[in-house]
Amino acid sequence: MLNNKVVSFLLVLVAVVSLSGCGSAQQIFKPTTPADQLTKLTFSLVADDEVNPNFLGGASPIEVQVFELVDDSMFMSADFEEINNDYEEVLKTNFVKSYDYFILPGQFKFIDSFEIQSDTNYIGVVAKFSEPNLSEWKKAVKIINRGRVYHLLMFFNDYEVKLDRVE
């Protein structure tokens, strides 16, 4: 009889400890970004082997600019020459910050995590293709500027940039 009580007590004790441990482990191992922290971004830039064909048909490297923007309206309405010549003037108060990259045909480039600026609400990407008039050279995506972690996938194929946000 004593053995049954001891065994029952031990089983209840193990169950209680196990269940309380689940709640603690969830807090320890569940990665979260507090709502008051600035959003963090990572990028992956991937270029197809045949990206940005030149006048001879061979693949060419691409200069890529990534913009932190307050709003995407000025960015999306600007033409290639305007952004290429003086993006700060064209984007006006919508411009927050820019990052410059260079990617080769067939290359994969990962950009480590960084915090966005507090007034950033959009990320814009410009790919400087050899034929901007034949290309889809810019894209933008909305982001929430606090409490998130995003990965942006930028895929460059022929004369096109594709931008996907993963949360």
Image (tube, rainbow, N blue to C red):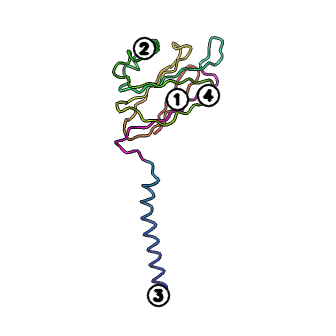
Q: According to the image, label 3 marks what residue?
A: 2
Name the amino acid type tagged 4. Answer: Gln
Q: Earlier in the sequence, mark 1 or mark 3?
A: 3
Q: Looking at the image, is mark 3 or mark 2 earlier in the sequence?
A: 3
Q: Is residue 121 left or right of residue 18?
A: left
Marks 2 and 1 close (CB-CB < 8 Å): no
Query: Circles 3 and 2: CB distance less than 8 Å?
Result: no
Q: Amino acid at mark 2?
A: Asp
Labelled pair 2, 4 in contact (Cβ < 8 Å): no
| In the depicted structure, whether residue 138 falls above or below residue 144 | above
Where disc 2 sits, the SS reads helix
| Crowdedness near tag 4: few (<14), some (14–19) or many (≥20) residues, C-alpha within 10 Å | some
Quarter of the figure with the C terminus: top left
Give the residue pinned by disc 4: 107
Dot 3 and dot 4 residues touching (CB under 8 Å) = no
Magenta span dominant secondary structure: loop
Number of the front mark, 1 or 4: 4
Tell me the crowding category of disc 3: few under 14, some 14 to 19, or many 20 or more residues within 10 angstroms, Cα based. Answer: few
| Foreground: disc 3 or disc 2 | 2
Q: Tell me which numbered mark, 2 or 1, is placed earlier along the sequence.
A: 2
**Quadrant of the rendered structure where residue 55 is?**
top right
Cα distance between the residues tagged 2 and 1:
23 Å
Q: Which residue is mark 2?
A: 86
Which class describes the residues within 10 Å of circle 2: few (<14), some (14-19), or many (20+)?
few
Sequence order check, earlier mark of 1 and 4:
4
The residue sitting at 50% across, 23% down in the picture is 100
Q: Secondary structure at mark 1?
A: strand
Q: State the image coordinates of residue 163 (x, y, percent, origin top left).
A: 49, 29
Q: Compute the Cα span from label 3 to label 2.
A: 85 Å
Secondary structure beneath label 3:
helix
In magenta, the rendered stretch is: 32-51
